[in-house]
Image (cartoon, grey):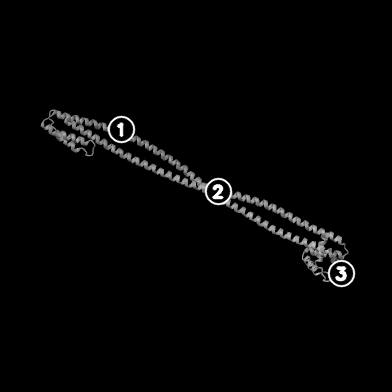
């Protein structure tokens, strides 16, 4: 029936109803004009006129038009239903996207926090530790060099002292040899001994530790009366005692030198072990710095990726909101149009059931004949 009605509407749209002022009041004419502005209202009026003009029963007309209005109500209900479903989908999609955005923002925050508060301080700490290790290595080598130079200087001093001791001991031995020849000296022998002792005195080095004592003894021996055997014996005893002291001193400095060399060699071993430890620590620290640099690069790449993902999600959310806003606009416009048509349809149906409309149709039929 609805298909027939639509076909009829197409025909009647060409022959619109002409409202006679003699039949309708001004209020009726105004309402009639408003109804005619609606597609369904205009259709119902034309359909009603056709139905009544062909001898149709008003009750049947009401039934058919009620069916049309019910169909409009069903279509409007379907519009509401589809929009409700779209709203449900929209709400779920928005909730999902907002949750993903929140999760992604948390990932971005964590990545930035890891970069700012872990990797960068770690990089600076590793750099400072490596610098300290390098300073330790430099200080270690400096200490070794200084110890080596000091050991060489100390050994040179030792050798000088040994030479001084040996020279002093030789001078004493030579003096003792000369003095031992004076058991019953002649004038010629005394002069020879004095000449040799003076020569020994003049050849001794002034910087020698024991030379002062030796020179004093020689000066005494040179000035002494060698004919006096008691004085000569005292001089010989003094020279022998001094020789014993020199030998003891030489043994002491030789032992000290051996101990110093032993301590130096132990120190060299210690410093070289420390140097090896520092070198190994540098290798480990360099590897840590490289790993940190790689982690920084990976984290920066991750941050860029997370920001890109976040932009994508925000774009999807914006697109969903825009699409839903458009759907809402379409829905509101559609509902408004349906309500307008339904209101016009109800007004048209009410108008059809007024006697004036039946009178109008009859007047139209009389005019045609």
Q: Which residue is mark 3?
A: 363
Which is nearer the eye, 313 or 353?
353
The single residue placed furthest to the left in the displayed view is 187
Which of the two labelled residues, at mark 1 and mark 3, occupies the earlier sequence position?
1
Work out whether residue 324 can be spotted.
yes
Dot in front, 1 or 2: 2
Q: Nearer the viewer, residue 154 or 33?
A: 33
Where's the N terminus, which quadrant? bottom right
Q: Looking at the image, is 124 positioned above or below residue 348?
A: above
Q: CA distance from mark 1 to mark 3?
A: 154 Å
Label 1 SS: helix
Question: Which residue is found at the position 37% from the left and 38% from the top?
Answer: 268
The quadrant of the image that shows the C terminus is: bottom right
Position of residue 280 relative to residue 19, above or below, is above
Residue 54 falls left or right of residue 157: right
Instruction: Give the CA distance from mark 1 to mark 2.
Output: 67 Å
The residue pinned by badge 1 equals 255
| Label 2, label 3: how far apart the Cα atoms are | 86 Å
Residue 368, image x and y in percent? Answer: 87, 70
Label 3 secondary element: helix
* Position of residue 321 in the picture relative to residue 68 (left or right): left
Task: Pinpoint residue 219: horizontal percent, then vertical percent.
Answer: 16, 35
Q: Which residue is mark 2?
A: 111
Relative vertical location of residue 156 with respect to residue 300 in this rendering, above or below:
above
Q: Residues within 10 Å of mark 2 (few under 14, many from 20)?
A: some
Of callouts 1 and 2, which one flags the residue occurring earlier in the amino acid sequence?
Answer: 2
**Residue 102 left/right relative to 21:** left
Q: Quadrant of residue 250?
A: top left
Label placed on residue 131: none
């Amino acid at each position: 029936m609805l298909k027939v009605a639509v076909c009829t509407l197409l025909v009647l749209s060409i022959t619109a109803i002409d409202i006679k002022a003699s039949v309708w009041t001004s209020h009726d004419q105004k309402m009639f004009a408003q109804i005619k502005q609606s597609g369904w209202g205009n259709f119902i009026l034309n359909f009603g006129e056709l139905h009544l003009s062909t001898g149709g029963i008003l009750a049947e007309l009401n039934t058919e038009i009620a069916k049309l209005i019910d169909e409009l109500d069903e279509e409007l209900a379907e519009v509401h239903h589809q929009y409700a479903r779209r709203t449900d989908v929209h709400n779920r999609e928005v909730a999902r996207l907002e949750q993903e955005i929140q999760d992604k923002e948390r990932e971005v925050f964590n990545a930035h926090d890891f970069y700012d508060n872990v990797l960068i301080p770690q990089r600076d700490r590793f750099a400072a530790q490596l610098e300290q290790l390098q300073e330790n290595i430099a200080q270690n080598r400096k200490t070794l060099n200084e110890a080596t130079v000091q050991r060489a200087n100390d050994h040179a001093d030792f050798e000088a002292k040994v030479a001084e001791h040996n020279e002093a001991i030789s001078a004493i031995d030579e003096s003792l040899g000369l003095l031992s020849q004076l058991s019953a000296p002649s004038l010629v022998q005394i002069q020879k001994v004095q000449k040799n002792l003076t020569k020994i005195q003049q050849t001794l080095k002034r910087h020698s530790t024991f030379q002062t004592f030796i020179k004093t003894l020689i000066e005494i021996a040179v000035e002494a009366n060698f004919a006096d055997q008691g004085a000569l014996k005292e001089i010989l005893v003094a020279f022998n005692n001094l020789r014993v002291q020199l030998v003891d001193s030489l043994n002491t400095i030789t032992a000290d030198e051996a101990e110093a060399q032993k301590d130096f060699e132990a120190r060299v071993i210690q410093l070289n072990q420390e140097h090896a430890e520092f070198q190994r620590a540098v290798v480990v620290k360099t590897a840590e710095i490289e790993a940190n640099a790689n982690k920084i690069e990976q984290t920066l790449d991750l941050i860029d990726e997370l920001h890109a993902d976040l932009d994508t999600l925000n774009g999807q959310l914006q697109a969903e909101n825009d699409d839903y806003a458009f759907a809402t606009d379409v829905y509101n416009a559609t509902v408004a149009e349906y309500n307008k048509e339904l209101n016009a349809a109800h007004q048209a149906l009410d108008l059809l059931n007024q006697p004036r409309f039946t009178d109008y149709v009859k007047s139209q039929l009389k005019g045609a004949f």
